[in-house]
Image: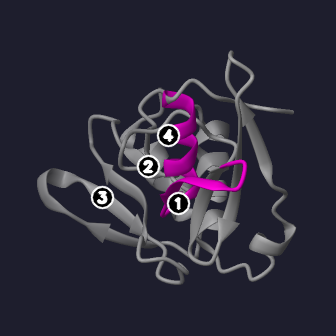
Amino acid sequence: MLTFDEKIKIAEEFIELEKKEVSMGRVNFHYEESAYDKKNVVYHLHPNGNGFVYAELVKTLRQRDERGMVNIREYTADDFRNLVKEAIASLQADDSTEEEFEIEEWENIEDQLLVLMPEEDGWNVYAGLKLDGTFNTYGEAIDYLEKEGFKRVL
């Protein structure tokens, strides 16, 4: 496990992040250029080594809490550095994201098929032509699909 100081040094490597002291000795790192309302990248980094990274929009990551946070207590230096890098990238404006996103198909054990696709400012899940659900973020849509017993078709 990395120490508090080691995690601080790694977070400080990212010049686009702004360090902010918060209560009880904790530190946040904000990404002020975020294309979204969310600006915290590293959240409540605590002197005991605990802390979180906001990764709701990191598509390759599946283990996050209901707020989109990943606990980094046991992360290695490389894992922490990579997660912060991906989190920053996920918060950057990218006009081509929707156009380049391929529609994802999700299937359950009963061979029912749902389709996930970006539309306007959110993500929609369809069962055929019928709208099954609308979500603010990709992560929320994925959480819904997984809780309903669906797996991504590769």
Q: Secondary structure at mark 4?
A: helix
- Residue 70: image quadrant is top left
Mark 1 nearby-residue class (10 Å; few <14, some 14–19, many ≥20): some
Using the image as rendered, state which of residue 11 and residue 151 is in the foreground: 151
Q: How is the image coloured?
A: one colour
Q: Which mark is residue 27?
A: 3
Whole-percent x, y for residue 154 in the image: 87, 33
In the image, residue 79 sits, relative to residue 20, either above or below, namely above
Residue at 65% over, 51% down: 126
Mark 3 nearby-residue class (10 Å; few <14, some 14–19, many ≥20): many
Query: Which amino acid, mark 4?
Result: Tyr
Q: Which mark is residue 38?
A: none
Q: Mark 3 and 2 residues: CB-CB less than 8 Å, in contact?
A: no
Whole-percent x, y for residue 26 in the image: 24, 53
Q: Which mark is residue 144?
A: 4
Closer to the N terminus: mark 4 or mark 2? 2
Q: Which mark is residue 137?
A: 1
Closer to the N terminus: mark 4 or mark 1? 1
